[in-house]
Image (cartoon, grey):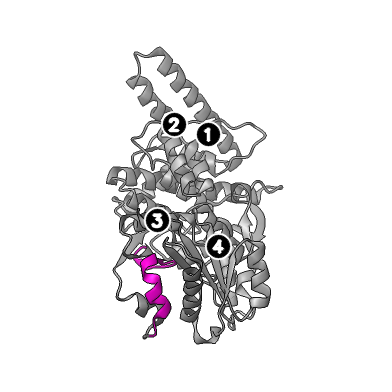
Amino acid sequence: MKETELAARGLILAAGEASRMGRVKALLPLPLAGEAGREGGAASPLALLAATFRQAGVADVTVVTGRHAASVEPAARTLGLAVARNPAPEQGMFSSVQTGLRALLAAGGAGPVLVIPVDVPLVRPLTLRALLTAAAQSPEAVHLPTFAGKEGHPPCIPAAALPALAAYAGPDGLRGALAALPCRRVPVPDAAMLEDMDTPQDYARLRALAPLRAALSPEETWELLRLRAVPEKGLRHARAVGQVACALAEALLAARRAAPTAGAALRPDLALAGGLAHDIAKGQARHEAAGAALLESLDLPDLAALVRDHRDLSLPDAQPVTERELVYLADKYCWGGQFVPVAQRFGQKLEAFAGDAAACAAIRGRLGRAQALEARLARELGRAPAAIAQETLARLGKAMPGCGGAAGPATEGSGRAEASAQAFGAARDKTAGENRA
């Protein structure tokens, strides 16, 4: 039986003093996204990690407490988590790791263990699942998640290694203890597992990032496309659609801010990510539904919603234009990486299906819906959205004719959602600040 066919276990380290933070990190509130990424409730790092483990299928989770046991342990038990108290947390984080491992050994169980500090609360379920899948294929190894080559949390440790780690007394803590074991890197499209919080400034940054967790950032989406081995032709089209969707979102956001009554909020970074991801399942039957299903399986509902309807949609007059409609229309303006008017785009399809009356009727229906949305958007923008698309693609073609992996989803123009190869934290923090301005 493979190791991950046994129940995996989670270990959350929450024993530190948090002297730089000045507050109990495990219990600080982090805002959550509501419907379609808008305002939602809040959850503590401890609660968020507990939910993440459960979403990934890990039900057996233990929290290691220490300095703030009096407040952390009741919260952990309320969440249905087991508790192990470190009697000497001043000896450092590895002492907490060993406390937790000894508790797991005493409880029994033969599955792998995912170990994460409570101050890395935004890691996504997709990362835990990727680690457990990799562990099933090579159960003797330690598995480490990476984003753009950078190692993050949590390590996935094989059960067979737990006794030696629990007894280790050598140098370099956990890193030293793991040095004798085979180690494999697992690339994931999740820069959030690199983000920790030790200071009030870190906490402010993670507060800005937490509501954005239900969708990938543009740079994470680009990494997902790379991991899915999307070919160069697909990357070129994805980048074009993403940039046009982002440009339309920024123009619409500016128009709404200038209007007497502010319209619905928009996230240009989400429009960009949706444009990048829209054809992620291209080549499969009903690729828009297949792509949405893939993203739903990764617990990315905001991104899935943009991909699901990019082939065809209609919008009632009472509902505002959102990132969903902008990704849809951006796709209609892009033939590969080149601009094409909506009528011409559908005209090509009518020519291709000229002998099929039913297909032509369906195409004309889709054309009418696209033109209706285009006209509605033009009224709200005060200019033709096709002109914005044409200008954006012209700049893109001059700036970067190819779209190889190093180029990523970078955008042109000032104020655009930053989405180059920068670190997740800087890009998402900037986007969050722009959208709250």
Of 196 and 368, the residue lying toward us: 196
Residue of label 3: 4
Mark 4 or mark 3: which is in front? 3
Mark 3 or mark 1: which is in front? 3
Q: Give the image location of residue 423, x and y in percent.
A: 43, 66
Q: How far apart are marks 4 and 3 (CA)?
A: 20 Å
SS state under label 4:
helix
Residue of label 2: 342
Q: Seen in the image, is 362 located left or right of residue 150?
A: right
Mark 3 or mark 2: which is in front? 3
Q: Give the image location of residue 339, x and y in percent.
A: 38, 39
Q: Sequence-wise, which precedes: disc 2 or disc 1?
A: 2
Q: Give the image location of residue 113, x and y in percent.
A: 44, 65
Let me know if residue 159 is in the magenta part. yes
Q: Are marks 3 and 2 in contact (CB under 8 Å)?
A: no
Q: Distance between the residues labelled 2 and 1?
A: 9 Å
Of 360 and 195, the residue lying toward us: 195
Let me know if residue 318 is in the magenta part. no
Label 4: how many Cα within 10 Å (few below 14, some 14–19, many 20+): many
Of 86 and 40, the residue lying toward us: 86
Q: Seen in the image, is 97 located left or right of residue 233?
A: right
For the residue marked with disc 2, what is the amino acid?
Val
What residue is drawn where x is 59% and y is 70%? 83
